[in-house]
Image: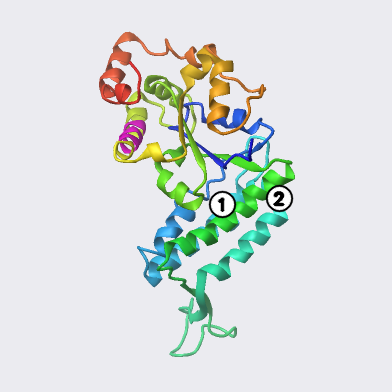
Amino acid sequence: MSDPSPVFVAGTGRSGTSRLADVIGEHPLIHRIPMETRFLVDPGGLRDLADALTHRYDPTVGEDALHRLSDMLTVRVPGRRDDRGKTVPELVGVRRYRDAVQRLWPRLVAHAYDEPAPAEGFGDGDRPAGPFGTPVRRRVVPGFFDDRGELLGVLRGLVDTLFGGAAADAGKPTWCEKTPFNLLCMDFLWELVPDATIVHVTRHPVAVLASHLAQPWAPSTVDGALAYLVPIYHRWLTWRDTADLAGRRYVEVRAEDLAADWPGQRRALFARLGVDDVTTRSTFQAHRLAHRDHQFDTGTRERIEAALHRIVPAMGYE
């Protein structure tokens, strides 16, 4: 078969996204970026910048977006480690990461200049507060892209360099990136990587909620978890009902179906990704999906099901 397209994995979180990304990344033609990169769709990342330098452009909005992207790419991403102690730059190549980020700024900035900064401490008229001269701060005029496609091409180059380079280092022709909230950013991801396949893995919403309650980063009460999850489902369903997914590289799989017939469902998944079937170390297993089935007492489960009564069937569950 020809080389497969890049893959984004999406879901609500706690729906099987990590396991599915592991499975896809164990295929000999697809390299999994081993952690959530976060700079594509998170606040302050490429998605925000794309809007700020196009249809939301003004110099202040654009400069703010560049400040936030700079913080994202030079502070937050390099400073975040996964459970193995690795960072995104280490996983895609530190030199490759630093060089690609450095090459990005001249393509996004139209002009840079120094602005006098207010003196700190005691000053007298035009005289600085001390012997060190008038302080300045660096300002930039952000580039304006009336052709959004031109900007997306610049940002695509960053992704191709980082993810494509990491895949090449692994001896594979393409890559897979997993961030759960790719779910809510599909339009942008297809703008960024037009030939990408997005794989959405679902799980019964009650089980998703139960799993969220056990996570340190999620609300720890049923009411809190409902407040967190229900808007995610509503946003996804509202977008899905108006999107033309039939014409896109979109694959939707249910974690429960994968577990019920793993070899057959794996074969079907790889076929939809355009690659031959292979046996993978990672699998979906029914007992791992069902171990929270009795987490709630009858009254609590009824309350949860009442809150999710429209979401459950809309997601294809009973």
Percent of width and height locating residue 273 = 55, 33
Say whether residue 159 is left or right of residue 257.
right
Report if the CB atoms under discs 1 and 2 are less than 8 Å apart: no
Q: Residues within 10 Å of mark 2 (few under 14, many from 20)?
A: some
Where 248 sits versus 313, above or below?
Answer: below
Return the disc, 1 or 2, that comes first in the chain's sequence: 1
Looking at the rendered structure, the number of numbered marks drawn on it comes to: 2
**Residue type, mark 2 in image:** Gly
* Front residue (pair 112, 283): 283
Q: Quadrant of the C terminus?
A: top left
Q: Quadrant of the N terminus?
A: top right
Residue beneath label 1, please? 76
Q: Nearer the viewer, mark 1 or mark 2?
A: 2
**Residue type, mark 1 in image:** Arg
Percent of width and height locating residue 134 = 53, 84
Q: Secondary structure at mark 1?
A: helix
Residue beneath label 2, please? 93
Determine the CA span between mark 1 and mark 2: 17 Å
Outermost bottom residue: 126
* Front residue (pair 20, 231): 20
* Front residue (pair 75, 176): 176
Where 35 sits versus 55, above or below?
Answer: above
Residue drawn at point x = 66 percent, y = 31 percent: 27
Percent of width and height locating residue 65 = 45, 62
Residue 230: in magenta span:
yes
Where 155 sits versus 135, above or below?
Answer: above
Q: Secondary structure at mark 2?
A: loop
* Residue 308, image quadrant: top left
Q: Residues within 10 Å of mark 1 (few under 14, many from 20)?
A: some
Image: magenta residue range: 229-237
Residue drawn at point x = 68 percent, y = 39 percent: 85
* Residue 63, image quadrant: bottom left
